[in-house]
Amino acid sequence: MTYTSPEQPSQGGYQPYQSSGASTYGAAPSTSKKLSMWGLILGISSIIIPIWINAIAGGVLSGIGLAKEPAGKTMAIWGIVTSVLGFIWAFIFWPVVLFGIIFAAVAPYATTGS
């Protein structure tokens, strides 16, 4: 067994990641914002076009982005907020639209009481 001084890196295993003076083991934090950005885009689209699948996908991508992408934290939070609002909006919008279509179809056949 050979001695490795602290100044020399070891030959195998995990290498310490230096971040602001602290030594941690594992992968460096991600600087990507792709998941957070797509979650926000889908969340906004679920408000503009009330389709509940956009809201679910936006919420899932934003949640994963919040957990794995510290650089995109703000976008991920807003993605979750817009996805929840879009999900609620979809369940308000479509019953109102369907009621309006049914009412418009039945209105000409309605009789007056006098």
Image (cartoon, grey):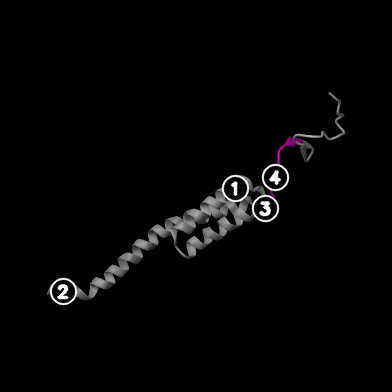
At label 3, counting other C-alpha atoms closer than 10 Å, the crowd grade (few under 14, some 14-19, many 20 or more) is some
The residue lying at 60 percent from left, 53 percent from top is 35
**Which numbered tag is attached to residue 66?**
1
Gap in Å between the C-alphas at discs 1 and 4?
A: 12 Å
Whether 37 is among the magenta residues is: no
Q: In this view of the protein, can residue 55 be seen by the observer?
A: yes
Q: Tag 3 or tag 1, which sits nearer the N-term?
A: 3
Q: Tag 2 or tag 3, which sits nearer the N-term?
A: 3
Residue 77 on image: x %, y %: 57, 51
Name the residue tied to disc 4: 29
At label 2, counting other C-alpha atoms closer than 10 Å, the crowd grade (few under 14, some 14-19, many 20 or more) is few
Gap in Å between the C-alphas at discs 2 and 1?
A: 58 Å
Kind of residue at disc 4: Pro
| Label 1 residue SS | helix
Q: Tag 4 or tag 2, which sits nearer the N-term?
A: 4
Residue interval drawn in magenta: 23-31
Could you tell me what secondary structure mostly forms the magenta stretch? loop
Q: As rendered, which of 93 and 59 lies closer to the eye? A: 59
Q: Tag 1 or tag 2, which sits nearer the N-term?
A: 1
All told, the count of numbered labels is: 4
Kind of residue at disc 1: Leu
Kind of residue at disc 2: Thr
Name the residue tied to disc 3: 32
Q: Tag 4 or tag 1, which sits nearer the N-term?
A: 4
Residue 10 on image: x %, y %: 82, 33
Q: Are marks 1 and 4 in contact (CB under 8 Å)?
A: no
Image quadrant where residue 99 sits? bottom left
The residue lying at 73 percent from left, 36 percent from top is 25
In the rendered image, which quarter contains the N terminus? top right
In the rendered image, which quarter contains the C terminus? bottom left
